[in-house]
Amino acid sequence: MPRWGMVIDLDKCTACQACTVACRVENNVSFAGPDEYRRSRAIFWNVVVGVIHGEFPEVRAEYIPMPCMHCDNPPCVKVCPVGATYKNQEGIVFQDYDRCIGCRMCMQGCPYNRRYFNWRVPEWPETFSEYRNPDFEARPRPKGVVEKCTFCVQRLRWAREEGRPIGSDYPDGVVPACVETCTGGARYFGDLDDPDSIVSRLSRSPRAFRLQEELGTEPKVYYLRPGQWTAER
Amino acid sequence: MRPVTSYHPQNKHEDTILSPLRRVTRVDRWLWAVLLSVMGLGAYAYSRQWVFGLGVTGLNRPVYWGVYITNFVYFIGLAHSGTFISAILRLAGAGWRKPLTRAAEAITVFSLPFGVASILIDMGRLDRVLNLIFYGRFQSPLLWDVTAVSLYLFSSVVFFYLSLLPDIALCRDRLTAVPLWQRRVYGFLALGWQGRPEQFHRLERVLDGMAIFMTMLVVTVHTVVAWIFGMTLQPGWHTALIGPFFLLGAIFSGTAAVVIALAILRRVYHMQEVLTVSPFNSLRKLLIVFTLGWLYMMVAEHLTQFYGSLPDEMEVFWQKFTGTFAPLFWLMFLTVFVLPLIILVFLGKNRIGWMVVASVLINLGMWIERFVVIVPTETRPTLTTGLGHYQPTWVEGAITASLFAGMVLLYAVFTRLFPVVPIWETAEAVEAETPPAGRAAACLACGDRANQENP
């Protein structure tokens, strides 16, 4: 049984936001429109967060792409009153759109703020309709429920149906949309339990860290610290 | 009518207490109409929310919970009035509580449904509420809430009804001039109560037993309400003090609400002789204690936070003390602590008007307190992906107003249908009537009730 995980190399990330776009298209994430965006209601299963360190002239910008962390010890699953969010055997944290009662307890529980609520009936522009992903897993969500990143579980399903390998270890391996599209090749996907997989090896790198590790949530998204760049290079 | 031997409490204030039940004035009808129309506005607002989703509120990311959850905590807190006055003070043997119990318990019974309603209104998918039963997970603090609050609602209704029983029987036998439907209601609800001494004896025992249960429940319920916040890892919420602090606040606002309700009843229904100033003075002392207790909790919580100075905690801390929520925070401090303490200590004694002013301030402040506990934390999430802002909309305002209107409406109608002062609990003795066969005076004052009497 694999335990899917992701590694994001912050040195390679150019903050181009291609992952954000690919994720939206792959998973039929609804369009908020300018008004709702201004009200902070837009849905992004994946975001690239910019963090500014220091003040001018000693300033440094850091960009952290954030999908769901798919914690091994997920606080959101713990607090759900109806079991609408759960972790499957491969370690992916899912949301059951048909069972969710919209109480938003999981959103309060998630220390990474990686969950989104459908404040209104999801909408897409007319022109988008023919580009919609027909996969069942990416079906449009109803209003009033929570949704989140699934590591593109529909891709994992059809990889198995077509007998294709999964993960960044294979040249034709199936990976989540954000990994596939990453322009800098900063993202890796694979089985953390396989000691030889790329993600497993990178997760043991001295550069590897996870967000808010001190909370004991055991996220399965690892980051590789940016290295020191010097003028001589 | 079948001839029944009824024993009725002999209470010299019986006529005064029953007089509001004998008629409905035009002012009543106007009040009810106004309250109903406010509720109608709330219903309209909710219909908008039902159709368009929670997007019609000011809620957003990361402020996932706002006014609705504040109302929830506030109404459940208000409900602690009755249980505190009748259950806890009953166990403590405080005799002065007796004239107040009914009015206090009515606040409990009529505010709880609106607490429940608040949380239902906050749900994104109300149509799936039964999932809580089909798929309920007891690992979730939310299910603790569902369990505790529904149990509390059920038991407080039973507790309320039981203590109302002898008085309903009295209404059945005394109020023969009221409309037929009303007499039928009394006849049905009285459950054939005759008020024999052994019935009273049994009633007292049941109420004593329930008082113990209710006391435990009151502590549990509001602690659990606080735990939906406390169990998360959010800065400002994740503290062991949040449970006791919420509980104290609940009893505090509940007791203040009792003062308001009693003062209005006393004035409107001319009950100055029944509801004397003395129990008000006792409530005043309690309120002073709670005010100081509130300050103690406040200092304990914020000093711990401040001294530890964890960066995430401090973000929330400064939001309250100097940031966006500072005006609300200091307004709360003024209305919950500074003004009520000054009023209650220096002006309140024997002056019901001042006590009401303090109580209104306290309740206003306690609502703000709940808001200030809930929202600032949400606007400063850890791993900041943009700071949160929250501006409630008219929908939330209208629904909040309608919840308060609903509570007042139920209360107002209740006072026209049932005695707001327990006639049997404040009676001097209980005597048999109709038929006059053997006026077997069953003196209740002798027996164990005498031991509790402590006027």
Image (cartoon, coloured by chain):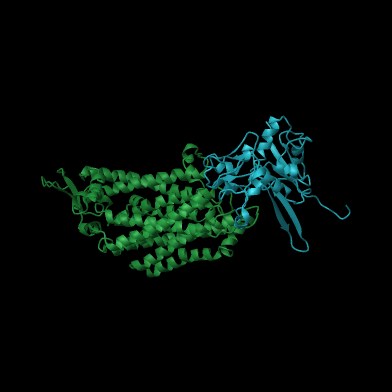
User: Horizontal and vertical percent for residue B57?
Assistant: 52, 55
Q: Quadrant of residue B1?
A: top left
- The quadrant of the picture occupied by the N terminus of chain A is top right
Chain appearing in cyan on the rendered image: A
Residue A43, relative to residue B376: is it above or below? above
Regarding residue B416, the answer to whether it shows in the image is yes
Residue extending farthest left:
B437
Q: Nearer the viewer, residue B293 or A34?
A: A34
- Residue in the picture at 46% in, 40% down: B130
Q: Nearer the viewer, residue B245 or B164?
A: B164
Residue extending farthest bottom:
B347
- Residue in the picture at 37% in, 65% down: B356
Chain appearing in green on the rendered image: B
Residue extending farthest right:
A232
User: Horizontal and vertical percent for residue A112?
Assistant: 64, 48
Regarding residue B445, the answer to whether it shows in the image is no
Residue B247, relative to residue A180: is it above or below? below
Q: Is residue B321 left or right of residue B291?
A: right
User: Horizontal and vertical percent for residue B226?
Assistant: 49, 50
Q: Nearer the viewer, residue A52 or B256?
A: A52
